[in-house]
Image (cartoon, rainbow, N blue to C red):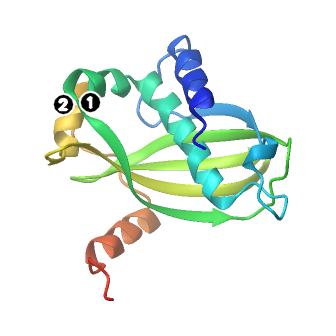
Amino acid sequence: MYPVIRLLKETYVNRRRAPLAVGETHVTHMRAWPWDIDIFLDLNNGRILTLMDLGRFGLFVRIGILKVMKERGWYGTVAGSAVRYRRRITVMQKLELRTKVIGWDDRFTYFDQSFWQGDTCCTQAIIRTAITTGKGIIPTSEVAQAMGFAPESPPLPDWVAAWAKAERERTWPPER
């Protein structure tokens, strides 16, 4: 089940926190609850991605884009991810989720998200998102203008740019 209560809490709590600029890191504290754990007693890999949604929502509130999206009838969607799972996360462990925008291209915004236990990174993901309507993807230049941001992205790290290029070249739909 989707963690709706956690999402509402994250949205509510972050309305009272200081605004952030694009590129600043939003931090979410949470625990791996028993219902997040799989049969191997680990935080489930799919649940990790779902919990990362919470970090992006918190960041959206703090940078102000959630308000703009609501006003314009826009919504966000995940358009891709590259994930590294490096350390086991088990039940009731305290976690810190760090989320920040690292840049964008003409269609997608790229987020760096990572789960930490103290000084140890357990999981890191680059999440590619789009702002869209029922008519298609909103160009990031239009989103930046609506937010009052410069339309130019900070330079993406080379490996993220290479991943984005590989995704553009990947055939779609896949062969059967």
The image position of residue 74, as x and y in percent, is 25, 34
In the displayed image of the protein, which residue is found farthest to the bottom?
Answer: 176
**Residue highlighted by disc 1:** 149
Q: Secondary structure at mark 1?
A: loop
Q: Residue at x 37, y 26 (%)?
A: 66
Counting other residues with Cα less than 10 Å from the Cα at mark 2, is it few (<14), some (14-19), or many (20 or more)? few
Kind of residue indicated by mark 2: Gln
Q: CA distance from mark 1 to mark 2?
A: 6 Å
Q: Residue at x 23, y 44 (%)?
A: 140
Residue 55, by quadrant, is top right
Asked if marks 1 and 2 touch (Cβ < 8 Å), the reply is: yes
The image position of residue 168, as x and y in percent, is 27, 71
| In the depicted structure, whether residue 121 falls above or below residue 19 | below
Whether residue 117 can be seen here:
no
Which quarter of the image is occupied by the C terminus?
bottom left
Q: Secondary structure at mark 2?
A: helix
**Residue highlighted by disc 2:** 145
Q: Residue at x 43, y 63 (%)?
A: 160
Q: Residue at x 62, y 29 (%)?
A: 6
Kind of residue indicated by mark 1: Phe
In the displayed image of the protein, which residue is found farthest to the front?
Answer: 1
Q: Is residue 22 left or right of residue 117?
A: left
